[in-house]
Amino acid sequence: MVFSSLVFMFVYLPVVLLVYYVSPVKWRNLVLFLVNMVFYGWGEPVYLFLMMFSIIVDYLLGIGIEKFRDRKIIAKSFVISSVVWNIGLLFFFKYFDFLLQSLQSMGLFQRISPLGLSLPIGISFYTFQKLSYTVDVYRGESKGQKNFIDFSVFVTLFPQLIAGPILQYKDLADQLKERSVNLTKMRDGIRIFTVGLCKKVLLANSIGKLWDDYRMMELSELSVLGAWLGLLAFCFQIYFDFSGYSDMAVGLGKMLGFEFGGNFNYPYISRSITDFWRRWHISLSSWFRDYVYIPLGGNRKGKTRWMINLLIVWAATGIWHGASFNFLLWGLYYALLLMIEKLWLLKKLEGLKKGAVVFSHGYALFFIVLGWGIFAIPDATAGIGYLGALFGASGVLKVSGDLFRIVNYGPLFIILILASLPTFAKLFGKLSPKVRNVAEPVLILCGLLLSTAYLVDSTYNPFLYFRF
């Protein structure tokens, strides 16, 4: 993984950008399509043909929907076919073995063997993108794409192909036809990419080692202090890992002339769980809102129906992350919290005076951190044991190793906390243009050098969201 990251940054990416820029504008989508195929084939050569076949299916269904737009029954049959195809594909690779093993634990289907297939990288992301296309065309929010290469570029855009953000077709349709690259976009793209790289390599990787230490620890040795310390490490790791990758995708998109929406907006400054989900993985929340929650009726059909819709959406959000009961529980956990807020608590939190907002921040962070405890450990026994250790089930408050790690990781935690706040961005924005013009390239160069040095020296470079 480390070697591949270095090759991507210093060999593949510069060559791609150079070829892209020197190509005539009318050929750039073809160049980008070929680049995307090479990129995906590099990581998943076995599933390259599956992706291409899947693209062809939705391309033809989109044409069918557009052609028979005035004949609702036929158009609806095409969009239903797209939903069945994409959800079926996702189910087969991601959930078949999980469901089979769950049924076998109840004594059913004992003669059927699990398939043991590896999960195609990025399948959770690109199947949702293809669904957004056929649904947008059916709703009349976009026209059916007749150009196969343009449609393929939408599905396979390499900056965000394997870990998002999830793109909706209606937001990108015009950019597929016409986009421009200029010095301002290039500068902004390089800056955003570098910020994301530093988040991922310097922050997420560094604190991830601490989480691994506690995650692998025997529950009998896990103290209350250690359990909370490890879980806080995971909170920062998953945020800087995923937001870092999202920033890199947005930055690379700008370098290619695309404008992707941001995927994170300082989620750990949230004052409620509702606020958190407006700031965390924004593209996923938006997708479920637009293509599941609102079509189900949202909150327009009474309180009981609204609660059912919320449960459906958050159960789906949970299992989207993985074939494990802890992800389903995590989704339902947030459904319950959001119900409590919408029905009663949110108005009280929003009505707090400035001096009391520390309570709302504390409340939100406590339940967010506890949620990551449910999310982080798929094994039920280990997960329950770890959550129990947070509240003293092990009977040990602290051990000497915890204090050593606090001293050792203390400076990093301070950096992580500060990096989770918008303070630095606001302060940098207040500098004069002359100072920013000098400071920005220096900071970018330092970030690239430090990240490269880390990658060269370290063998630890996990991408958490690749498995989703």
Image (tube, rainbow, N blue to C red):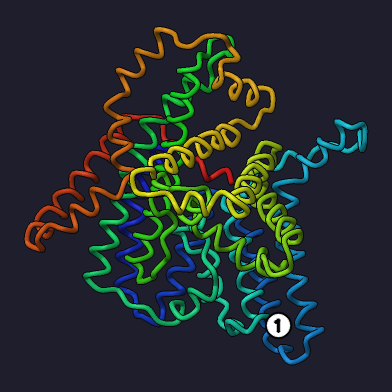
Which residue appears at 72% of the width and 57% of the height? 89
- What amino acid type should be assigned to the residue bearing mark 1? Ile
| View extreme (left): residue | 434
Q: Is the residue 161 above or below the residue 93 in the image? A: below
Residue at numbered disc 1? 65
Q: How many marks?
A: 1
Tell me what residue is drawn at x 28 percent, y 40 percent. Answer: 418
Tell me which residue sits at (40%, 57%) in the image: 249
Image coordinates of residue 384 in percent, x first then y, are 65, 24
Q: Position of residue 400 (x, y in %)?
A: 39, 7
Give the residue displayed 62% in from the left and 61% down from the top: 288
Residue situated furthest bottom in the rendering: 70
Q: Secondary structure at mark 1?
A: helix
Q: Is residue 365 above or below residue 11?
A: above
Q: Quadrant of the N terminus?
A: top left
Q: How far across and how far down the image is residue 452, in percent?
A: 27, 40
* Direction from residue 70 to residue 10 in the image, left or right: left
Q: Is residue 86 left or right of residue 35?
A: right
The correct choice, above or below, for 274 with respect to 384 in the image is: below
Q: Is residue 162 visible?
A: no
Q: Nearer the viewer, residue 6 or 310?
A: 310
